Image: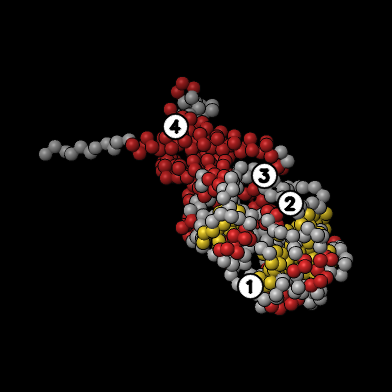
């Protein structure tokens, strides 16, 4: 490349970084600040443990309908590989897909009204109809809409969302969560309801904005390295040609520009461009194959209580390789047994999993009794011990299975393991040396984000001054 072309390339690099920084600088600042908020206040959600904690113990004396009769009354076909018996207010119900069947009368139940939603939530406050709002904007709620929002009126400002279709509490939020999320996840994910409700549009906005921001960050790293002089220094012994705010922008960019770039690039990758990364949930046909073909449960209503301790709030029926299991969940504990009275064997899980993963031979089985870099509990609760089944299919699939329940908790193929390093390690700092020490990880997040904040703020100041600089007036030639 000739000197003229090099000079032109450098000029375009300088102009590109300058104007990309002016255009995207505010996004950088908002992403950094909101990301720090998200370290401590995640987006509102209802965990399974929280949902079970709000359920009353099953009133066995009111259960008069057998599981097979409930499945028949649900009209769900084919029969699902799993369903549950719980309380809905004062009535036991079977939850079979989206169908709710009375455990007393055996009839399929209709939508839930405001009064019943208030009773289910155990509240004394008001009830508001909600189709979609800021906290239920995600598409995972679509099959449960609309909702009754029950305002409990407690000191925490708790609001519960009860599905009109199923009568299930699907979400709880508090005043603290809602307030901080307006400057946390809503900003970080560009999550205003009108935009997020249009999934494809929201996805494109995130991809393009973070993609353009990536170009701005990468150009800054290249430009910063090009302009620094360590040996043949600028006048007065300076390593940078800039002065004032631009000098600080250059120096701090050299110190933290690469980290800021990895934050932006990994954030872009979190949107899964071109669907490069497989989701952690196995496909539906895998789950169906894992469950296997099963006959009727064959238990009458009177026999169900023997499967569960007295404080059971949910009795879930699932299949594993065609065999029916029952999981009784109570306060802080659960127990899974086969309906034939036997437990769950490791070989049974392995055989069922081998039928589920296409194009693979028998898996290599590893029993984890401690967390490692691919199975750890930094962001959510994860059980131990766990079975890791490694397959030799084209995607090099791993399945993480709970040996106590037989449930597949995670699929992790080659792309998923790459995502663990490209996003979780680079964006969340889930590095092996840090995941064991969360306070150290938080300190590293603060240090690197504050460094990025200085880069961003100095860039914004420089960009603002550039925009305010008066343009030179052209001088008309004399007549």
Instruction: Please name whichever residue, 233 or 59, is drawn nearer the observer in this view of the structure.
Output: 59
Mark 2 vs mark 4, foreground winner is: 2
Residue 98: x, y in percent?
Answer: 64, 70
The image shows residue 221, relative to residue 111, as above or below, that is above
Q: Residue at x 46, y 26 (%)?
A: 234
User: Which residue is tagged 4?
Assistant: 246
Marks 2 and 3 sit apart, C-alpha to C-alpha, by 15 Å
Per the rendering, the mark at residue 165 is none
Say which of marks 2 and 3 sits in front: 2
Q: Indicate the secondary structure of the residue bearing disc 2.
A: loop
* Mark sitting on residue 109: 1
Q: Nearer the viewer, mark 3 or mark 4?
A: 3
Q: Is residue 277 visible?
A: no
The local crowd at label 3, few if under 14, some if 14 to 19, many if 20 or more residues have their Cα within 10 Å, is many
Q: Residue at x 64, y 54 (%)?
A: 46
| Dot placed on the residue nearer the N-terminal end, 3 or 4 | 4
Mark 1 neighbour class, 10 Å CA radius: few under 14, some 14 to 19, many 20 or more: some
- The answer for how far apart the CA atoms under marks 2 and 4 are is 47 Å
In the rendered image, the quadrant that contains the C terminus is top left
Name the side, left or right, on which 238 lies relative to 284.
left
N-terminal label among 2 and 3: 2
Res 355 quadrant in image: bottom right
| 1 vs 2, front mark | 1
């Amino acid at each position: 490349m000739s000197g003229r072309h090099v000079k032109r390339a450098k000029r375009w690099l300088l102009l590109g970084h300058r104007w990309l920084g002016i255009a995207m600088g505010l996004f950088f600042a908002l992403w950094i600040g909101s990301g720090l908020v998200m370290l401590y206040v995640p987006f509102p959600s209802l965990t399974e443990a929280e949902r079970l904690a709000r359920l009353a113990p099953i009133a066995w004396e009111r259960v008069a309908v057998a599981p097979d009769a409930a499945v028949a009354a649900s009209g769900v076909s084919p029969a699902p590989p799993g369903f549950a018996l719980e309380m809905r207010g004062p009535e036991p119900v079977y939850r079979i897909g989206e169908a709710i069947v009375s455990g007393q009368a055996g009839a399929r139940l209709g939508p839930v009204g405001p009064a019943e939603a208030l009773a289910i939530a155990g509240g004394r406050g008001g009830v508001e109809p909600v189709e979609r709002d800021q906290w239920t904007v995600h598409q995972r709620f679509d099959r449960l809409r609309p909702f009754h929002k029950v305002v409990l009126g407690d000191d925490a400002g708790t609001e519960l969302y009860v599905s009109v279709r199923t009568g299930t509490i699907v979400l709880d939020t508090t005043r603290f969560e809602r307030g901080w999320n307006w400057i946390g996840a809503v900003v970080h994910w560009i999550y205003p309801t009108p935009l997020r409700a249009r999934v494809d549009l929201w996805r494109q906005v995130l991809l393009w904005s973070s993609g353009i921001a990536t170009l701005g960050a990468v150009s800054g790293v290249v430009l910063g390295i090009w302009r620094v002089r360590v040996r043949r220094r600028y006048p007065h012994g300076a390593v940078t040609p800039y002065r004032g705010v631009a000098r600080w922008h250059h120096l701090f960019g050299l110190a933290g520009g690469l980290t800021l770039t990895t934050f932006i690039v990994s954030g872009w990758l979190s949107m899964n461009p071109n669907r490069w990364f497989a989701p952690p949930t196995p496909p539906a046909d895998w789950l169906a194959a894992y469950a296997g073909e099963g006959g009727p449960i064959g238990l009458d209503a009177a026999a169900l209580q023997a499967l569960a301790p007295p404080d059971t709030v949910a009795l879930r029926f699932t299949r594993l390789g065609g065999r029916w299991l029952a999981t009784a969940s109570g306060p802080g504990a659960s127990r899974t047994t086969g309906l034939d009275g036997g437990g769950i064997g490791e070989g049974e899980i392995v055989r069922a999993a081998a039928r589920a993963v296409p194009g693979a031979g028998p898996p290599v089985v590893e029993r984890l009794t401690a967390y490692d870099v691919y199975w750890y509990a930094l962001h959510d609760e994860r059980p131990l011990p766990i079975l890791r089944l490694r397959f030799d299919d084209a995607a090099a699939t791993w399945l993480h299975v709970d040996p106590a329940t037989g449930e597949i908790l995670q699929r992790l193929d080659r792309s998923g393991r790459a995502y663990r390093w490209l996003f979780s390690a680079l964006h969340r700092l889930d590095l092996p040396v840090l995941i064991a020490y969360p306070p150290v990880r938080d300190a590293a997040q603060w240090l690197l984000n504050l460094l990025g904040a200085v880069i961003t703020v100095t860039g914004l100041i420089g960009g603002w001054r550039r925009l305010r600089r008066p343009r030179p007036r052209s001088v008309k030639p004399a007549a």
